[in-house]
Amino acid sequence: MRKLICIPLYCILVGTVSAQTISIYSLDENNTSALVNDGGIFFNDPSSGSGYEVPKGSGLKTVYAMSFMYGGVDINGQLKYSGQTYGPLEDQFRGPLTIDGAATADQTGVWDLSSIFPASKQEIDNHILNYATAGYVLPSNLANWPAHGDVSSGFDYYLAPFVDVDQDGTYDPMSGDYPCIRGDRAVYVIMNDNADVHASGGEQLGIEMHYMFYQYASLITDIDNTTFVHGKIINRGTQFIHDFKMSVFLDSDVGNSTDDHFGSDSTRNMMYFYNDQFDETNGPTLGYQDAPPAFGVMSLSDDFEHTGSIIEPASTPIDFWNIMSGRKLNGTPWQDIVNGGETNHMYAGNPNDPSDLNNEIGAAMQAGDRRGIASINGGTIGIGDVREFDLAFIYAKNDSASNLDNVSNLKLAGDNVQSYFDNLVFDNCASPMVGIEEPEFENLTIHPNPSKGEFMLSIGTEFSHAEIEILDLSGRIVLDNVELNASETKIELMQPAGIYLLHLKVDGQETVKRIVVE
């Protein structure tokens, strides 16, 4: 048996193999504070429970625990499963796996200390400006970015993404290289499911999991209340995994855990939780009181194949596999509570519509403690194959609205988050447009550079059509579709100080130039 011993900031997991320290990081760049650890149980405080606070600093929480579950079958139909609900390092462990097919984990050295790596856009911008300046001190988190694995021990050379400024294939921050992150602040976590026997009893898949949790500090309320997650799953084993499913388990306690409801919205790929009319404080757990919020998770890049509330007590791998696959514990499909037919999405009706009974309010279900699973179908994942997903954890609260109004507000917030995400530009989480073959624009000038935000751009040659867009280093477009004059064009970039990428398109040719706002 494993025992969890907690001290401030860290928890020590005493297990059958060795004692390990779980590192915990508070991602709180915007209006939320999301606790991320390298034990595989996210948005959870091992010492007190709920670990997702919104608004930040209020003491009000919306999540008790969130984790990821993976499953599939081999060529013989044998179930393989890796999933955790509340116990860290039970089925999923820190660090990468070897790429030789043995999928061996290394939990010595750096991975025995931590598998969680934070970085911020501000730190990276400062590094880009000053890495070659005398007296510059490289931040330890940039120095320790896990860009490479130990190839002498059989691990992949390339792990966490980075921008390779000098194009030598090696992460060297003192040559200008820097972590490639999304958002204004991110934390990167590398885990695997092959380092130990699974406490769940599930057979190992041999997968390596990379997670980037990130936030934007935005003037857009819905974005400022959101935490994003990018997941990357690699099959390091020797077998194909068929019917591979990637699922998010969410125990969302919206304030007081005893008075919540569950819902889903398949058109938005959303699973959500909402409160009854008044959210009381329950002992040490603060309630949101009047106008309690709604909270949920959206899949931004793939359809949720199944979204469901965990009604029956699941405990075994086959139990969770059935739920991940849209089935009851006895293997029969979920049933629509109104029409009686099969359904892939439980309680998918509109609780604001009195004529729609396919929701917990319409079905007159008593509020209580709710847990849910939402699954993405990854198909067949071959040896060395990669599957990726993008999620957003969203929140909506209007102080003058009812609990059900805030469900509608959450769906509108979800639309805004989806639109925002769709307009971001990522190149495999590398710096935007990295790899564009740059033509020679010998007479191109951008001055002054750096500037306070006003630049004069001249191409210096004849052209039929030219335009620019400007992005920040996270991939966000901050200025778009600016057409250029034949002589000089004034560019006004009203953005915070930092490094930006000017993407120039001239008669079918493209180039990228860095500009600096002081």
Image (cartoon, helix red, strand yellow):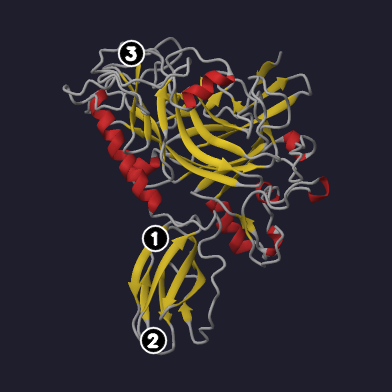
User: Is 42 left, or right, of 374 in this rendering?
Assistant: right
Q: Secondary structure at mark 3?
A: loop
Residue 4 image position (x, y, % from top left) = 67, 17
Q: Compared with residue 428, is residue 286 higher up or lower down, i.e. above or below? A: above
Residue at the spot of label 3? 367
Report the residue marked by disc 2.
Answer: 463
Residue for point 56% across, 20% down = 318
Disc 2 residue type (three-letter)? Phe
Left or right? Give the position of 88 relative to 514: right
Three-letter amino acid code of the residue under disc 3: Ala
The first of marks 1 and 3 along the sequence is 3
Residue matched to label 1: 478
Judged from this view, the residue extending furthest toward the left is 355
Please state, as top left, top right, bottom left or bottom right, where the N terminus lies in the image: top right
Provide the secondary structure element on which disc 2 rests: loop
In primary-sequence order, the first of circles 1 and 2 is: 2
